[in-house]
Image (cartoon, rainbow, N blue to C red):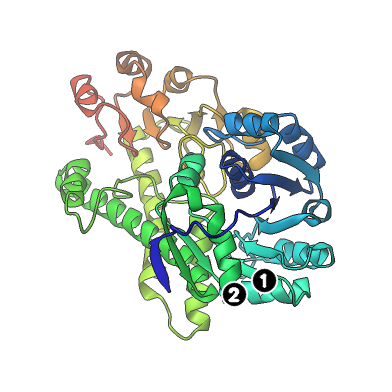
Amino acid sequence: MVSAPFESQSVAQAGEVAVIGAGYVGLTSAVCLAHLGHRVVCADVDAYKVAELAAGRPTHHEPGIDGLLRAGLDAGNLRFVLGAAEAVADADVVLLCLPTPMGADGRPDLTALTGVAAAIGPQLRPGAVVVDKSTVPVGTTRVVAECLGRGDVAVVANPEFLREGQAVHDFLHPDRVVIGGEDRDATARVAALYESLGCPVLVTDAVSAEITKYAANAFLVTKLSFANSVAAVCEALGGDAHDVLRGVGYDHRVGHAHLRPGPGWGGSCFPKDVQALLHLAHDAGEPFHLLQAVLDANESHFDRVAERVLALAGDVEGGPVVAAWGLTFKADTDDLRESPALAVLRRVVAGGGRVRVYDPVTTPERLAAFDPDLAVGVVADAYEACTGADVLVVLTEWQEFASVDLTRVASLLRRPHVYDTRGVLDRSELARLGLVARIPESS
């Protein structure tokens, strides 16, 4: 097991790199590897997506993607094709960046991954290395190898650690690269992909690499739920949660990252990865009681935030009007999957609230397509959401919200109640204007 910066100059760069899947992980990997000088071909089964990307138009919102996409196409070392079979024929390294959604039983659904592996097996050139980039349960490298049906092809685990909204930065400036496999030549060839980044590279066995991704996300959500629980105590006792957590985070053993209160955690990775690790632990005969408590605490926190929003709004005939800022699960992404904002707003609507919401990248059509049953109105700007509202709740940390005119917001609200779950607004200005998140005495 090696944990050190990868400094070897003796490993030749891979020839052509094939990236299978042009989603959030796949597209980021493709454009960034092309930026590092590799020849990359990226494949997807969606013809529209392939055509858009080939024309230099990103198919999802992610800062930095558009510039790298156009640069790779202009340089001639990035191309897009329809279907995995065409992509892998000349590839020395094949990255599988395929969805592994949570199945009905809470375990990852590997259908897409195993289906592609079976399809590309006969097409691979001898000596190719296939890389699991997707977040997968323990033993998936072996499963993929069986699906490939090739004794002359190695399979390596190389989990991604990309944050939506900062994926390009995270790929090009990683905290670490984790590679798991038993074939030392194959792991070295994968390490060579990242050689120019000069980051720590952990080379280990496949099982350890697969567990590392789950363990990392489990620890992060534990910090998030801890911060939210501290915030609840602070609100009950009159303390300032942001100051308390800032004080805790100055301890170098703790750190400030992921130690901020919010409406709860979610997104495309955290919920399914937590469930996957819980199932892995259970199946191994070692129940992960702490992580189960973290999951339960997050669900309770959604309830608590919604209850507080409704209490701040007060008892209004016909239901209070609730202004909400933010729908995506975090800023700088258009991803609505498992969004804490949506989890809270569903509860607010169920409690009788009439919601008007503004989000910088979410249109009424997009929300309706994603969740047709959520009865909220999506408006064109932050101020329109506030007009005549009984409470404003901030649910996503878009930087745009930090620069709003709070004096204008105060003039538009029917009641002076602002609940900033993300801490993006100027607290001193809120206090000066009397826009405080205080439960009315009558409630």
Q: Is residue 325 left or right of residue 419?
A: right
Location of mark 1 (residue): 154
| Residue 41 in view (yes/no) | yes
- Displayed quadrant of residue 2: bottom left
Relative image position of residue 145 (x, y in whole percent): 70, 74
Q: Residue at x 49, y 32 (%)?
A: 355
As drawn, 324 above or below 257: above
Location of mark 2 (residue): 183
**Kind of element beneath mark 1:** strand
Q: Nearer the viewer, residue 8 or 198?
A: 8
Relative image position of residue 280 (x, y in whole percent): 52, 76
- Quarter the N terminus occupies: bottom left
Relative image position of residue 233 (x, y in whole percent): 21, 52
Q: In the displayed image of the protein, which residue is found farthest to the bottom? A: 285
Q: Amino acid at mark 1?
A: Ala
Q: Residue at x 64, y 60 (%)?
A: 100
- Displayed quadrant of residue 221: bottom left
Q: Is residue 441 left or right of residue 391?
A: left
| Residue 372 in view (yes/no) | no
Contact flag, marks 2 and 1 (Cβ < 8 Å): yes
Q: Amino acid at mark 2?
A: Asp
The alpha-carbon separation of the residues under discs 2 and 1 comes to: 7 Å
Q: Residue at x 68, y 75 (%)?
A: 143
Q: Nearer the viewer, residue 162 or 195?
A: 195
